[in-house]
Amino acid sequence: MVRNISEDLRWRIVYLHCDGLSHRRIFRYLYVSRATVSRVLRLFKRWGSVRNPFDGMRERKRILDNNDMGVSQKVICICTVLKLTFSRFYRRWLLRKLIGILMNYYPRWK
């Protein structure tokens, strides 16, 4: 059995549902499973599209080297000091400045 159905068929499911057809009539009319009709309509209600926008967006896991680990330890130490000594708004401002400095120093983090 085919695992992926075409985007055209997915949109037909949505249009038939908007025309007032029940789930049962849709899956009998288009010869798809009941679960497929439910899945497509759930995706459409949630995202406004018939495809999940997060499918296929798997990124490669980043491997940190010793330099990156040292920087992250320093950032954690700075954050704990900031949390203990400064107010919330001043902490936020300082963290933004720190992140800006790190982004300029380590351009591959962008």
Image (cartoon, rainbow, N blue to C red):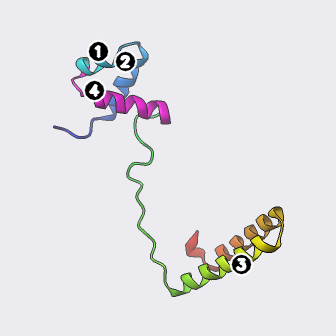
Which one is in front in this view, the residue at disc 1 or the one at disc 2? Answer: 1
Specify the principal SS of the magenta part.
helix
Instruction: Say what secondary structure mark 3 lies in.
Output: helix
Closer to viewer: mark 2 or mark 3: 3
- Can you identify the residue that label 1 sits on? 25
Q: Which mark is residue 16?
A: 2
Residue identifier under label 3 = 78
Residue name at image x 78 percent, y 70 percent: 94
Q: Quadrant of residue 14?
A: top left
Q: Which residues are magenta?
A: 30-47
- Quadrant of the drawing holding the N terminus: top left
Of labels 1 and 2, earlier in sequence is: 2
Residue 31 forms part of the magenta stretch: yes
Confirm or deny contact between disc 4 and disc 3 (CB under 8 A).
no
Mark 4 or 1, nearer chain start: 1
Q: Which residue is mark 4?
A: 34
Vertical comparison of 108 with 14: above or below: below
- Quick one: label 2 or label 3, which is nearer the N terminus? 2
Amino acid type at circle 4 is Arg
Q: CA distance from mark 4 to mark 1?
A: 10 Å
